[in-house]
Amino acid sequence: ALGRMLPPDTFLAEEQGEGSLKVVAGDAAATLPLTVAVGPLFTIDLIPPAVEMNAGSDTTFRAVGYDAYRNTVEIEPEWGVSRGLGVFTEPGHFTARTAATGFVTAQVGNVVGTAALTIHPGPVDRVVVSPKDVEVAAGDGVTFGAVAYDADGNVVPSEFAWTLADPESGSID
């Protein structure tokens, strides 16, 4: 339906399209052509509305604008992302960088649509061990620490397997 009549004689336009309005008085009638155009932008929906992904991967978002009656409004939004979680390389095409949670936004004027974003670390790219250079006296011990990182510098929670590179060097208890 293009809309509805409100008493006594007001037409409330709702759905975009073309039709006609008929007015009857006694035995006489008049028909008027009626065109309902899209209203001003009221809201923006992002598709998908939520994404979980790994750092280093990419995905595409789509923004759809609507007027107050959910008629589709053509838009070309400005894309953004919170907390430096990644970058848009082209409209809607997002590449994740930082492991954290936040939002993707599509904005036209004062109207903003959002999608929830959760970025997990990517696969382990490198392991940093400390201390780096070790010289230890016989009978003394050294405690090492290790941190795993993905290609974007995010810490990747990891379990480490420690071995001696040269089996002739001794053993690990």
Image (cartoon, rainbow, N blue to C red):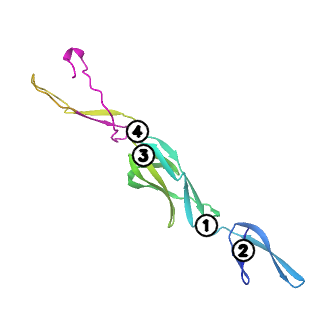
Q: Which mark is residue 119?
A: 3
Mark nearer the N terminus (3 vs 1):
1
Q: Can you say whether 120 is above or below 39 in the image? A: above
Mark 4 lies on residue: 122
Q: Can you say whether 42 is above or below 58 in the image? A: below
| Amino acid type of the residue tagged 2 in the rendering | Arg
Residue 136 is left or right of residue 126, and the answer is left
Magenta residue span: 145-173
Q: Are marks 1 and 4 in contact (CB under 8 Å)?
A: no
Give neighbour class at mark 3: few <14, some 14-19, many 20+ (Cα, 10 Å).
Answer: many
Q: Give the distance between the C-alpha atoms of the residues marked 4 and 3, in whole angstroms.
A: 9 Å
Mark 2 lies on residue: 4
Mark nearer the N terminus (1 vs 4):
1
- State the SS at label 2: strand
Mark 1 lies on residue: 67
Q: Position of residue 1 (x, y in %)?
A: 74, 67
Q: Are marks 3 and 2 in contact (CB under 8 Å)?
A: no
- Residue at the extreme front of the image, as rendered: 173
Q: Nearer the viewer, mark 1 or mark 2?
A: 2
Q: Position of residue 151 (x, y in %)?
A: 37, 37
Q: Can you say whether 27 is above or below 58 in the image? A: below
Near-viewer residue (83 or 28)? 28
